[in-house]
Amino acid sequence: MGADRAVISARDAIAIIGAVEVAGIRCWVDGGWGVDALLGAEQRPHDDIDLVVPLAEADAVLAALDPHGFRCHLDERPTRLVARDRAGHQVDLHTVTFDHDGTAWQDGAGPGGGPCPYPVEGFTTGTIEGRAVGCLSAELQLAHHRGYEPGPVDLADMARLCARFSLPWPREYPDA
């Protein structure tokens, strides 16, 4: 965990997702909270929450989070934004653009800085504290972990996904 970042509890995660949804914006949980949403239970502490949101709605998402104390900390559009509150809670916004068939594309997040695809079948539903939330599928979570050298937390998350969903372990990584 980062020294200047606070733990995002399940309650925090639901409040953040709820603020975005109340503004009429769809979002999907990615990363660690996305893994836990697929598993239906919190498996570990989280120092952020990753949300996939439409790029065209990024300013509206920031406006929806503003009453909760979140301000833009880092703006790397069109790839991502980071919002933080004074307590150090962090929301990483992965901004995407949808094409005509429903595939989302995150500019600059793919191998070599190219676009990163989010196939339409990669959007699903999970639960946090019994509340249904949009999230990315286990297959898409695994695919997106392949673009960098994963740390121990990432490897543990992938191992949980592979075990729960009977998915093959990515061959490019050491055995879990």
Image: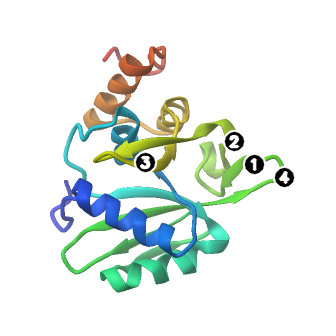
Secondary structure found at label 2: helix
Q: Are marks 1 and 2 in contact (CB under 8 Å)?
A: yes
Left or right: residue 38 versus residue 137 is left
At a point 36% along the width and 17% down the height, the residue shown is: 163
Q: Mark 3 or mark 2, which has the lower sequence index? A: 2
Q: Which residue is mark 1?
A: 102
In the rendered image, the vertical position of residue 81 relative to residue 108, given as above or below:
below
Q: Which residue is mark 4?
A: 100
Q: Amino acid at mark 1?
A: Gly
Q: CA distance from mark 3 to mark 2?
A: 19 Å
Q: CA distance from mark 3 to mark 4?
A: 26 Å
Q: Say which of 60 and 159 sits in front.
A: 60
Secondary structure found at label 3: strand
Q: Say which of 35 and 134 sits in front.
A: 134
Q: Which residue is mark 3?
A: 132
Quarter containing the C terminus: top left
Q: Which residue is mark 2?
A: 120
Q: CA distance from mark 4 to mark 1?
A: 6 Å
In the rendered image, the vertical position of residue 157 relative to residue 130, given as above or below:
above
Please provide percent x and percent y for residue 138. 48, 31
Label 4 environment density (alpha carbons within 10 Å; few <14, some 14–19, many ≥20): few
At a point 54% along the width and 32% down the height, the residue shown is: 143
In the rendered image, the vertical position of residue 11 relative to residue 73, given as above or below:
above
Q: Amino acid at mark 2?
A: Val
Q: Mark 3 or mark 1, which has the lower sequence index? A: 1
Q: Say which of 91 and 115 sits in front.
A: 91
Q: Are marks 4 and 1 in contact (CB under 8 Å)?
A: yes
Q: Nearer the viewer, mark 3 or mark 4?
A: 3
Please provide percent x and percent y for residue 57. 61, 73
